[in-house]
Image (cartoon, rainbow, N blue to C red):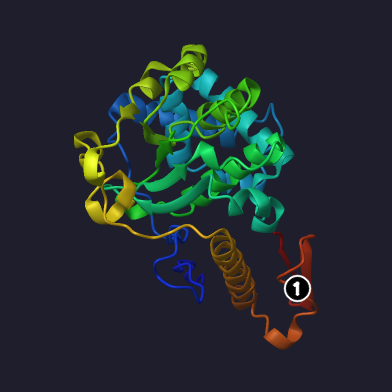
Amino acid sequence: KGVKMSMRSSTTTSSSVVLPTPLADKRSPFKTFTVLDERQKATLQSFRDCMLKNTTVPPLSDEEKLFVDDACLCRYLRARDWKIKQAEKLLRDTLEWRKEFQVRDIQPEDIDFELKSGKNYLHGVDNVGRPVIYQRPRRENSKNYEDQVKLMAYLLERATDCMERTKGVEQICLVIDYKGYSMMNAPPMHVTKKVLSLLMDRYPERLGCCFMIDAPLLFYTMYSAVKVFLPKATKQKIHFVKRQRNNAMSATLSRYFSPENLEKEYGGTKTDTFQGQEYVAALVAERDYRQRTHVQAVNHCCGIRDEDVVAFDADQKEKTEVNVERKGVTATYCH
């Protein structure tokens, strides 16, 4: 049996500080987000066989097999209108990207400078439990476009770890605040396209809704240039919202958020303030907790005692191996 992986992100700071959305328990079975008809069930089975039993391509690794579960297969099929060939290409391209980009290896320390700015952060959920990523372009603090993309990928990965499987949650909610948006903090077009590619090609069907708050004329000009690349279904998820007087909640946001789940400046009652040092510290503490419980779970399953462990350093960034000559078992943990 595994060790419970859910944990509320915690530090010694006040509860009024913004903290990452808590992790979800991934051991529970996934509740299907949409009910499949008989034709879709047959398509899903064919796609599953195509990905797992196809002998004309290299077999998937154990890690990839865990990633390619039925919920994942359904998302890729939906993204390509249930066409298996197109969905397979999209999924295999994603698996290759995940290996090359090493997305699961990104650590908070790697993007510390980007994280501390508060320009992008994960905090809370909407009415149906979708993790919320807040974006404030005015807080842009660097021209390191590679790390900016890495930050978004990290947050998307972290958001998927918050999704409650038993409730069928498999999407995120984006709240983008364009107050103070200008040419000085607007990302170059190639960065915007990369982020869009992340959402559409590497995390298809992960976007549940997106709220553009106080988008200025400058943004509309840029949006006109990129919206041609957006699928119709994605465009329908984008809502343009204006701030209300006295921080009242707009009618649009009230359909998706209860007051306690939305930050105060958008009409909610959450008064948490973002403090970069505390936010990164919470992510690091959470990461260390997950590493410890992973090793404990492996040791427990393999019958390994703590005193048998040769070496494990939870803080090092390089791959750490725990080699134990016991019952012919080698336990390995990778960051």
In this view, the residue in front, 37 or 170, is 170
Question: In which quadrant is the C terminus drawn?
Answer: bottom right
Q: Position of residue 78 (x, y in %)?
A: 41, 26
Instruction: Give the quarter of the image for residue 170.
Output: top left
| Any part of residue 248 in sight | no
Name the residue at 69% across, 58% down.
109
Residue type, mark 1 in image: Asp
Residue 235, x across and y down, in percent? 38, 21
Q: Residue at x 48, y 29 (%)?
A: 76
Q: Position of residue 275 (x, y in %)?
A: 52, 60
Residue 21 shows up from this direction: yes
**Where on the picture, by quarter, is residue 211?**
top left
The residue depicted at 49 percent of the width and 53 percent of the height is 161
Residue 93 drawn at (x, y percent): 64, 28
Mark 1 lies on residue = 313
Q: Nearer the viewer, residue 288 or 294?
A: 288
Relative to 138, is 229 above or below? above
In this view, which residue lies farthest toward the bottom? 307
Q: In this rendering, is residue 18 above or below 1?
A: above
Nearest the eye: 241 or 304? 241
Residue 96 figure quarter: top right
State the residue at coordinates (63%, 24%). 188
Tell me if 227 is positioned left or right of 240 in this view: right
With respect to residue 275, does 207 lie above or below?
above
Task: Name the side, left or right, on which 10 lies relative to 128.
Answer: right
Q: How many marks?
A: 1
Element carrying mark 1: loop
Determine crowd level at label 1: few under 14, some 14-19, many 20+ residues with C-alpha closer than 10 A: few
